[in-house]
Amino acid sequence: MKTKFLFTLALAATVCAAPLLAADYPVQPVPFTAVRVTGGFWRERQEVNRTVTVPFALQQCEDSKRLTNFDLAAETMRRRAAGEKDFQNKPPTIYPFDDTDAYKAIEGASYVLSMTPDAALEKHLDDWIARIAAAQEPDGYLYTFRTMHPDSPAHKWIGEHRWEKDPDLSHELYCAGHLYESGVAHFQATGKRALLDVCLKNAELLWRDFGDGKLRLAPGHEIVEMGLVKLFRVTGDARWLKLAQIFLDARGPGGPAYNQRHRLVVDQIEAVGHAVRANYLYSGMADVAALTGDTRYLDAITKIWESATARKMYLTGGVGALAKGEAYGADYELPPNGYNETCAAVALMMWNHRMFLLTGEAKFMDVFERTAFNGFLSGVSISGDRFFYTNPVAYDGQKKNNSGFAGRVPWFGCACCPPNLMRTLASLTGYFYAVRGDSLFVNFYAQNEGAATVAGTKVKLAQTTDYPWQGAVRLAVSPEKPAKFSVRVRIPGWARNRPVPSDLYSYDDQVSAVWSAKIGRDEISGPLENGFLVITREWRAGDIVELNFGLPVRSVRGNDKIAATQGRVAFERGPVVYCVEEPARTFVPVEWVVPAAATLTAEPRADLLGGVTVLKVGEVTAIPYFAWNNRGLAPMAVWLKRAP
């Protein structure tokens, strides 16, 4: 049964992997369909995502009338065509980008279908897609707020004419971008073209309007660039890549920094403005850099990445400190009540993975891991049906800071975050492994089985681990025949005494020998290249790499330039950041002083928060940051006062 499963994964990898184009990422990811989590931390979260979050999000899209928007748009077109020239419908939802929640929900559900066939779910999506297709105008335009109410703008963000307010807030091209991502995901999951054909019809309209040079404008909310690249990959039609580049190059100079229009993209050097928009832009720039070979985009996003990770990122991997504009702040402006939108964490993960694929450097996957275990995962409850829009590192236990709510809630008026979490969790295994020539990269630790092709040889992979709670990782590397190649095993920055790849945060102590590796009795300590332990040998079926990451409790200090962390300490163990939450409200965590002689110990608690390892900081218990606010409203803090 196990052999059959791995063969199926290998076949899926062949079918679903994008073709390696003449110009493409130097490092190619092993697709998520070729890797399956088989147990442990991420298995539990993917199962909750599949069985709870996906059906919950689909139902919320129905209940909140996001699908009704498509029905009303279709009705308006139908009745006008029948002679009711003045007929129109008023949108029942709040925002003109509400269409995208349905698109992201389809994308996430499609990723689930790729891994676990489900006839009922597939039928559900087919029904949704038929409703979406019915709302598309004959020339390909698909934007329900305009179509259902065509005689005058149905929202103040919408212009009298198509596209004219997109550089500001109409979100027409943003909707198109999420449409394309969902259409490609559904096609790859099912082989059905219904939604992909809707995408291509819409993209043809964009090409007619923008690709011929008559109209140039910068999308007000980026993501259409990434969506177009996905269309290019699945169709091979170079127009879609060209259109992505057109939209990138339309930005700046002289526009608002809020949506990154202040400079030409190739001249930008700092992470600024709305953090979700920004990180989507930088991801799109990475795609275009890889596929065109234009190094100007890579040069720019390298500078921007250094700005974000060295001066503007929270210890949890969250970004976008400011509530005003949901934006990046100034250098070292990292207040404890920082905004840190969940979507910004998702986009940061996308961007860092792309930076890794461009460079082969582990530091990008270090940031990815930090965000995944902390500032991303905190966005969804352990139960899978309650969400955070914002992810501060301190909370007073009562403020309505979660998009107008106190504590986790089932849904939002602006509901971008829940389906974004859903699609990312469903496809997380696509970040685990990658290949470049005769090198196999092991990027992420979780119990899994997978398959890849390295230097022309098919290789089965299996990790056995209870990471992040335990540091032992047993990696079985089994080529179909003996073959020489390199396995590049990421040694996380935290295991090399660097919590982040900059001086933004550092450990109070420097611990030696935090990691070890061996094959059989042979200890392996090097070489280390770009954060990876490189093991080059003739590999044979049954070869096992045994990794061991020590997991001491580490005390973290912030850079002296961060006003909010001065005189404070945070704690982490491995990739997991901890916080103190006080449901009983017997003290205020943000005011609690860590005793100078406090002992720091880790303790597994199977009975708490779905099973976590907690920290004992003297007499106080700290929990993983991702698990806070699962026990009702309570004050919380990551950064605690140091004893004088």
Image (cartoon, helix red, strand yellow):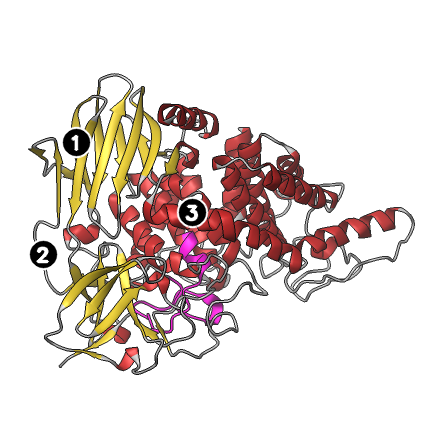
Magenta residue check for 342: yes
Vertical side of 222 occupied by 237: above or below: above
The numbered mark, 2 or 3, whose residue comes first in the sequence reads 3
Direction front: furthest residue: 607
Name the image quarter holding residue 152. bottom right
- For the point 75% across and 51% down, the residue is 71
Magenta span includes 162: no
- Residue at the spot 28% in from the left edge and 43% down from the top edge: 445
Furthest residue to the right? 83
Image point (71%, 45%), residue name: 131
Separation of marks 2 and 3 at Cα, in angstroms:
33 Å
| Residue 204 percent across, percent down from the top left | 65, 37
**Residue 182 pos. (x, y %):** 56, 43
Residue at the image point whose x is 63% and y is 62% from the top = 95
Choose between 250 and 552: the one closer to the eye.
552
Q: Which residue is under mark 1?
A: 535
* Residue situated in front as seen by the camera: 292 or 554: 554
Q: Is residue 417 found left or right of 530 in the rendered image?
A: right
CA gap, disc 1 and disc 2: 24 Å
> What crowding class fits label 1: few (fewer than 14 Cα within 10 Å), some (14-19), or many (20 or more)?
many
- Rendered image quadrant of residue 35: top left
What is the count of numbered marks? 3
Q: Nearer the viewer, mark 2 or mark 3?
A: 3
Find the magenta span and give its range.
319-347
Give the residue number, with chain letter if any, for mark 3.
Answer: 46
- The type of residue carrying mark 1 is Ile
Name the secondary structure under disc 3: helix
Residue 474 x/y as whole percent: 21, 37
Which residue is under mark 2?
Answer: 511
Q: In the displayed structure, does residue 75 sit left or right of residue 52?
A: right
Secondary structure category for the residue under label 2 = loop
Q: Is residue 310 visible?
A: no
